[in-house]
Amino acid sequence: MIGSLVYFRHRTRDRWIRGEADKWLAERIRQTNPQARLWRKRLQRRVLWVPSAVALMVFLFFPETTGFASHMFCGRFIHLGEYRINTPLTWIVASRDDSSAWVIATKGIGRTGFRTYWRKEAPVSEMVFHISSDPAPPTSEWYLAHARVLSKQTLQFGPEKLTCLDIVAYAETRPVAMSPDLAEILCSSERNDIGVNFVGQRSDSSDFYEVLQSAARAN
């Protein structure tokens, strides 16, 4: 966008000079205040850079901007069955229906730096929600049997309660130790009709827990 602006200015330079000369002569005839004329020129120059500044901010914080856009089109709240869930503004609502939703988040170049993006190491976090009207048998028993539980807590999810396990999957057979900056959290209700999972940056897990606690029955 900056290149287009420079090219546009180059192509219209002569016409712009003639236009400025005509305005200068007209102002001289009207005896306009020189100070006001100077401020008008400065304002015009700054306004020309507004589109470039906006494009730069979108580029540096593109994931966060996409999150704002997804909430503008999809709404701030996710409705799953009888529940209403409040999602963070900078998280992207990737998909949703009446019984499931997938919400993701990552950091833009302005927050992580060019080196991280150049190495393709942009941190990504995701939340997955699944709600069923009928209780289902647990599907993660084998998975949890091969994992190490770091912590366990019970959280309120509207009128229901979720048990959340912060785990290290395949702890005994994992060839490389899991980074402490990463987290995998599995949550389920007592009847196993509500399942919520989080995988991603541990620094984003606080947003995940806030989302769970924001759940309420839809009116």
Image (spheres, rainbow, N blue to C red):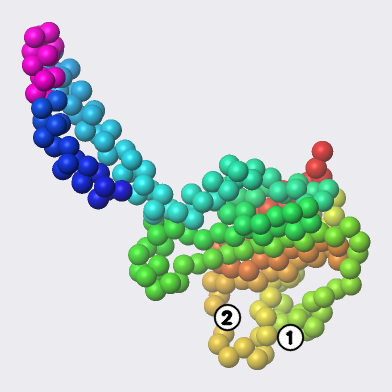
* Residue span colored magenta: 20-32
In the displayed structure, 25 sits above or below 137; it is above
**Mark 1, secondary structure of its residue:** loop
Where residue 219 appears, as percent x and y from the top left, is: 82, 38
Where residue 31 appears, as percent x and y from the top left, is: 10, 9
Where residue 76 appears, as percent x and y from the top left, is: 64, 44
Quarter holding residue 108: bottom left
Amino acid at the residue labelled 1: His
- The residue labelled by disc 1 is 146
Where residue 218 appears, as percent x and y from the top left, is: 80, 42
Quarter holding residue 53: top left
Amino acid at the residue labelled 2: Met
Residue 210 horizontal side relative to residue 31, left or right: right
Instruction: Tell me what residue is drawn at x 82 percent, y 75 percent.
Output: 139
**Mark 2, secondary structure of its residue:** loop
- The residue labelled by disc 2 is 178
Q: How many marks?
A: 2
In the displayed structure, 183 sits above or below 67; it is below
